[in-house]
């Protein structure tokens, strides 16, 4: 049986990789040609094992299918299976057994090819990833996407404990750039994150990439290395563009990687408002000086500047810059409408914008600029995250909200928000206790003990009624208390 018989071309388009589960120890070993075996000393034995693993993984990968291709679907959530020799394999163990039993010759050939390539080029396997160009038989294009297997780091020297350690960090980063093959980048990201046991979310679009991933220290460092050496990002993404905070894989329920129209959902086609039209970026220091000037002006009642928090209301509620305007909007896709409805507010003004890590400002400022009413639009490079690193005791008050299970990351800013029920200073969010409701609520420990665990009294009652009848009929996913707030607030000019 030759491999080309069961080779399916469309496998290269698929997004879900399961390399992390690859464990060759259970598989019968392939037998390399005797003359090669003789050449294997202790150090090349390791290279051989690594090349064999890669060859095996590449072979299995080529047999992989998902129910639907991921692009242009909004997320790659299709079920994965494998087709080989006219058989279907529902789990990885099945296809591994099959490949080990029936394709050892093919895998052996691939292994030799990879080894020859390694010998011809660099001898350092950790820095010579297998790419399309290096595939042993280029006449048989296994992979349409060159990005697919680029720079998957070698983790063989890392212990399982170290790799899966709970004590780690959460990375937050983005990179606006032209991505020609979002599907290919998506597949590589999936392979990379699974390989490194990371959790979190990565959004990929033709306008770039936006990720927040959690894992052990060693895994997140390898992730940064891989990103920084990727051809797409190596000249534009810098190590300091990654914002780090204490955390780990436990901060996210799972790993979600997908291709979207925008890397942050503003709801405006990137071709209409491009990141290239962004405002003027200010370093934390420059921003600090501008805020200082603004606050001084503001005290004299003659500010020509607006300090604009472009995050959602529940984020700015627990922490914001002194003297900022914080729109009461529930999601970023309302920001453009907010701008449209409040154009007079911005007319003739200098606008200083900020958000968590800078990504929303990149295109938010471009949108504001596109209206042509402001005197100037500036934004904080690296967002509050980077500002707090340089100015822990600066003009930011309260906590920094983050979109993972931690909800906030500590800062020196104290507490500026209150418990919804008793008014005591409180800034620890929790999810409303009424199941289908997805609102966040600030309820202090005492109030929680008294049973105030829902987003509002109405929702609390509904929750109790629901528990009594144990039926979720007629229940909206979003609480009615959101309806009491204006969808798009209009500011007094
Ligand atoms: Zn087969
Ligand atoms: Zn309370
Ligand atoms: Zn609720
Ligand atoms: Zn409510």
Image: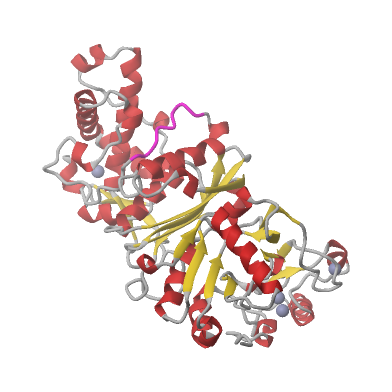
Using the image as rendered, state which of residue 227 and residue 108 is in the foreground: 227
The overriding secondary structure of the stretch rendered in magenta is loop
- Residue 199 in the image: state x and y as whole percent: 52, 50
Location of residue 184 by image quarter = bottom left
For the N terminus, the quadrant is top left
Q: Image check: 427 left or right of 333?
A: right
Res. 343 visible in picture: yes
Where is residue 215 shown, x and y percent of the image? Answer: 55, 44
Residue 156 is one of the magenta-drawn residues? yes
User: In the rendered image, which quarter contains the C terminus?
Assistant: bottom right
Q: Along the line of sight, which residue is nearer the eye, 272 or 51?
A: 272
Location of ligand 1 given as a quarter of the image: top left
Q: Residue at x 44, y 67 (%)?
A: 279
Q: Position of residue 63 (x, y in %)?
A: 28, 48
Residue 262 in the figure: left or right of residue 331: left
Q: Residue at x 60, y 45 (%)?
A: 248
Q: Name the residue at 66% across, 74% down.
A: 437
Magenta-colored span: 151-158
Q: Residue at x 61, y 77 (%)?
A: 327
Image colouring: secondary structure
When asked about the image quadrant of residue 299, the answer is: bottom right
Position of residue 277 in the picture relative to residue 326 (left or right): left
196 in the magenta segment: no
């Amino acid at each position: 049986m030759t491999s080309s018989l069961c080779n399916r071309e469309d496998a290269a388009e698929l997004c879900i990789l399961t390399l992390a589960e690859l464990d060759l120890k259970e598989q019968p070993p392939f037998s390399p040609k005797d003359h090669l075996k003789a050449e294997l000393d202790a150090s090349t034995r390791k290279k051989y094992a690594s090349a064999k693993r890669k060859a095996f993984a590449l072979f299995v990968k080529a047999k992989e299918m998902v129910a639907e291709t991921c692009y242009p679907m909004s997320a790659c959530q299709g079920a994965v299976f494998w087709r080989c020799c006219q058989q279907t394999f529902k789990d990885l163990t099945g296809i591994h057994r099959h490949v080990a039993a029936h394709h050892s010759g093919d895998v052996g050939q691939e292994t030799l090819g990879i080894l020859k390539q390694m010998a011809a080029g660099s001898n350092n396997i950790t820095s010579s990833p297998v790419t399309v160009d290096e595939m042993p038989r280029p006449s048989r294009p296994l992979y349409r996407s060159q990005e697919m297997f680029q720079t998957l780091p070698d983790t063989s020297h890392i212990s399982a404990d170290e790799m899966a350690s709970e004590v780690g960090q959460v990375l937050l980063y983005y990179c606006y750039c032209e991505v020609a093959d979002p599907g290919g980048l998506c597949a590589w990201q999936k392979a990379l994150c699974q390989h490194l046991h990371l959790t979190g979310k990565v959004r990929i679009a033709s306008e770039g990439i936006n990720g927040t991933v959690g894992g052990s220290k060693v895994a997140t460092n390898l992730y940064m290395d891989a990103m920084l050496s990727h051809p797409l990002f190596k000249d534009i993404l810098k190590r300091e563009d990654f914002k780090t905070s204490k955390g780990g894989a436990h901060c996210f329920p799972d790993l979600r990687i997908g291709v979207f129209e925008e890397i942050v959902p503003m709801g405006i086609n990137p071709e209409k408002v491009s990141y290239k039209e962004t405002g003027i970026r200010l370093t934390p220091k420059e921003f600090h000086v501008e805020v200082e000037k603004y606050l001084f002006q503001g005290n004299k009642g003659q500010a020509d500047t607006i300090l604009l928090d472009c995050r959602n209301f529940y984020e700015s509620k627990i922490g914001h810059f002194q003297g900022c305007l914080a729109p009461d909007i529930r999601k970023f896709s309302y920001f453009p409408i907010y701008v449209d409805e409040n154009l007079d507010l911005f007319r003739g003004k200098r606008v200083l914008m900020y958000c968590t890590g800078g990504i929303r400002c990149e295109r938010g400022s471009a949108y504001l600029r596109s209206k042509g009413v402001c005197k100037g639009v500036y934004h904080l490079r690296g967002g509050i995250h980077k500002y707090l690193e340089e100015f822990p005791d600066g003009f930011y008050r309260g906590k920094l909200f983050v979109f993972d299970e931690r909800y906030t990351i500590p800062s020196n800013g104290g507490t500026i928000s209150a418990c919804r029920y008793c008014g005591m200073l409180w800034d620890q969010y929790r999810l409303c206790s009424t199941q289908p409701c997805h609102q966040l609520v600030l309820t202090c420990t005492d109030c929680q003990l008294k049973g105030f665990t829902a987003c509002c009294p109405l929702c609390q009652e509904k929750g109790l009624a629901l528990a009594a009848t144990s039926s979720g009929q007629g229940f909206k996913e979003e609480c009615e208390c959101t309806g009491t707030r204006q969808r798009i607030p209009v500011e007094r000019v």
